[in-house]
């Protein structure tokens, strides 16, 4: 089995270069909990390049505008329709933010108005490795210990032939998992465990 | 009889009270204090207060049955009355399974926390100190609200085994919020000392004024992880949650951030950056404190965290006995060693970051990781290429002080600070921290 590698999608609009320590924490969890062989180095691939089609798993995030060029749009669509998997995470953890609005519009343009749908909290992705009975785990960005919590209790996805091709989160997992790996030991529960589910789902579903 | 007793007066009084005791064991605690304060708001003095308090507490025990009674009348009749009442209560009480006998006499280190300068503060001196602050805020058409509070007092204890402890102390606290007339800018300062001669209300006011003027027209910055410089006032309210949780029992019982899954504590383990040294020392001249704990145990210098490693935990006498270790008393002060950097150097060395001058309303989210939440307030600033660029809107944060001390970049010089949450004084350095988590924006000023 070829080692799993983590691909980050670089796109021309907005900013793609976020939560830089996140991949290493996620890869660390794959090593710790699974037997999946892992390539430790994150791969950064331009969406307009053909390299994208070689990746089993892609990650796309940002804070700002998402507006694909025609080639980027074409690649994104073909990649997903041919069985690729993209995990998209809004760094603003905000359903009204620029990233959220523009990305959702971009998905409408690319896959049609109803393509992006809420997935149920008993979806297979919540059981693909660890069990998350309540659906997506919350982040500290949402649970701020006060009455102004903005908790997104669902994730959205574009499903192609019964399998998720684009998993879309407003929860800002990327920033939640973006810390020095040495600090992982201070967490009561390793918060990147859901990342393991996403990768396992992407590779096996 | 005066309210503040000298050592010999306190001793004589305790002996007198003790002479009425018929219990197996008896312990007397007394305290006397005089406080004064001046409060101002909207640039005018609003209240001037004074408080005199004296208390006597008697704890009697028969076997493992304990009763405590307190009184604030200091007459021979009252002394006998309070002793009898504590004995009645002890006879009625169920046996305490965690009972430990009163302590044998102890030897205490010398700590000088009583300053004549502070003891001599009167309403005139308070008015002068506040006038200096008011002049400055009025002159710039800013609105000041502040509180000046001074205290002198003593506490003493004696028990039927011959232990006697006495500690006199003074303190003065000054806190001030300055607002701009449009309400968009706010600056805060809090200073606490044992010796009032170190308090400069004008200098403190100038800092609060500078922060209030500088924080107008704050721009919103996106929540996320940022490098922060925490002024000691901001750092204190986070770090004291570490200090409050040094108890061995809660660690052993799995209730604290110092618990391990196997039912043991993290004593001996490195939990933070190796530049972190936290200790207690009642003889520290900048933060003098009582050399004895509430139960009469002597307090010497105790290292809590040395080079990032947990060295000691607080063992109550009961928990120590149960675990066959030496008891470690609850400290009366906490000091975190600093580095050499000045605030200016910390700012100058920062490419992109946030200067946090105050955090408030701190609440615990998870006691086992010490995850805390709260808000920035009264002046938060964006730093770029070594200079303060502009004020920013306040944030809510989500951070554990343990993780924070692992993300330590630079330590400044320790200074005495007042916690805006607990009012405790500490010696704490300013610090530069990587990846501090701000979770959302706040509209507060």
Image (cartoon, coloured by chain):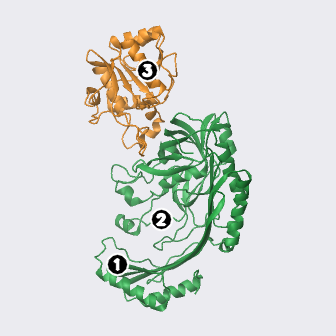
Chain colours: A orange, B green
The chain identifier of the residue carrying mark 1 reads B
Find residue A96 and report its image quarter. Answer: top left
- What residue is rendered at 69% in x and 44% in y? B344
Where's residue B38, x and y in %? 63, 66
Residue B121 visible at all: no
Tag 1 secondary structure: strand
Q: Quick one: label 1 or label 2, which is nearer the N terminus? A: 1
Task: Tell me if B301 is positioned left or right of A143 in this view.
Answer: right
Residue B235 visible at all: yes
Indicate which disc residue B418 carries.
none
What's the CA distance linking mark 3 and mark 1?
Answer: 69 Å
Indicate which disc residue B330 carries.
2
- What residue is rendered at 33% in x and 31% in y? A154
Indicate which disc residue A103 carries.
3
Between disc 1 and disc 2, the foreground one is 1
Mark 1 and mark 2 in contact? Answer it, CB < 8 Å. no
The chain identifier of the residue carrying mark 2 reads B
Find residue A27 and report its image quarter. Answer: top left
Task: Tell me if A173 is positioned left or right of B342 in this view.
Answer: left
Q: Where is B440 relative to A63, above or below?
A: below
Indicate which disc residue B66 carries.
1
The N terminus of chain B - image quarter: bottom right
């Amino acid at each position: 089995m070829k080692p799993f590698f983590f691909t980050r999608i670089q796109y021309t609009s907005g900013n793609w270069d976020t939560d830089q320590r996140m991949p290493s924490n996620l890869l660390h969890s794959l090593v710790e909990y699974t037997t999946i062989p892992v390539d430790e180095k994150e791969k950064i691939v331009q969406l307009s390049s053909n390299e994208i089609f070689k990746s089993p798993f892609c990650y796309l995030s940002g804070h700002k505008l998402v507006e694909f060029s025609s080639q980027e749009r074409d690649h994104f669509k073909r990649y997903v329709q041919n069985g690729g998997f993209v995990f998209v995470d809004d760094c603003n953890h905000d359903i009204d933010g620029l990233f959220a609005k523009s990305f959702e519009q971009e998905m409408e343009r690319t896959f049609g108005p109803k393509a992006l749908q809420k997935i149920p909290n008993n979806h297979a992705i919540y059981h693909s490795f660890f069990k998350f009975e309540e659906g997506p785990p919350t982040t500290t960005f949402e649970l701020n210990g006060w009455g102004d919590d903005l908790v997104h209790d669902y994730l959205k996805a574009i499903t192609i032939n019964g399998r998720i091709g684009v998993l879309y989160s407003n929860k800002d997992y990327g920033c939640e998992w973006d810390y020095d790996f040495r600090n992982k030991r201070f967490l009561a529960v390793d918060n990147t465990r859901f990342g393991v589910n996403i990768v396992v789902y992407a590779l096996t579903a | 009889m005066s309210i503040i007793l000298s050592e010999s007066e306190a001793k004589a009084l305790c002996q007198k009270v003790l002479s009425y005791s018929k219990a197996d064991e008896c312990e007397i605690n007394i305290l006397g204090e005089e406080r004064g304060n001046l409060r101002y708001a909207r640039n005018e003095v609003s209240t001037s207060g004074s408080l005199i308090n004296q208390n006597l507490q008697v704890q009697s025990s028969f076997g493992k049955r304990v009763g405590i009674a307190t009184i604030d009348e200091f007459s021979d009749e009252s002394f006998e009355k309070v002793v009898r009442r504590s004995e009645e209560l002890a006879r009625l009480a169920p046996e305490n399974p965690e009972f430990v006998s009163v302590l044998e006499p102890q030897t205490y280190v010398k700590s000088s926390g009583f300053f004549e300068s502070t003891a001599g503060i009167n309403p005139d001196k308070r008015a002068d100190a506040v006038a200096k602050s008011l002049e400055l805020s009025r002159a710039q058409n800013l609105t000041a609200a502040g509180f000046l509070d001074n205290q002198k007092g003593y506490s003493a204890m004696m028990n039927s085994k011959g232990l006697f402890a006495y500690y006199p102390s003074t303190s003065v606290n000054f806190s001030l919020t300055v607002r701009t007339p449009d309400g968009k800018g706010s600056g805060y300062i809090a200073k606490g000392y044992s010796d009032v001669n170190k308090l400069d209300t004008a200098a403190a006011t100038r800092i609060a004024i500078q922060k209030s003027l500088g924080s107008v027209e704050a721009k919103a910055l996106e929540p996320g992880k940022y490098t922060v410089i925490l002024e000691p006032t901001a750092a204190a309210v986070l770090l004291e949650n570490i200090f409050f949780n040094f108890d061995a029992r809660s660690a052993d019982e799995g209730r604290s951030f110092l618990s391990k899954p196997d039912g043991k504590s993290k004593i001996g383990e490195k939990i933070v950056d190796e530049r972190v040294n936290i200790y207690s020392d009642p003889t520290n001249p900048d933060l003098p404190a009582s050399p004895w704990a509430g139960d009469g145990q002597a307090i010497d210098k105790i290292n809590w965290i040395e080079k990032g490693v947990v060295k000691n935990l607080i063992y109550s006498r009961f928990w120590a006995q149960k675990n066959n270790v030496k008891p470690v008393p609850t400290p009366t002060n906490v000091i975190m060693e600093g580095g050499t950097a000045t605030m200016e150097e910390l700012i100058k060395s920062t490419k992109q970051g946030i200067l946090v001058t105050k955090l408030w309303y701190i609440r615990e989210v998870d006691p086992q990781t010490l995850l805390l939440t709260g808000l920035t307030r009264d002046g938060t600033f964006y730093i770029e290429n070594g200079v303060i660029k502009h004020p920013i809107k306040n944030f809510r944060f989500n951070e554990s002080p343990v993780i924070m001390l692992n993300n330590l970049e630079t330590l400044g010089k320790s200074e005495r600070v007042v916690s805006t949450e607990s009012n405790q004084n500490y010696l704490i350095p300013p610090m530069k921290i990587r990846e501090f988590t701000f979770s959302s924006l706040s509209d507060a000023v």
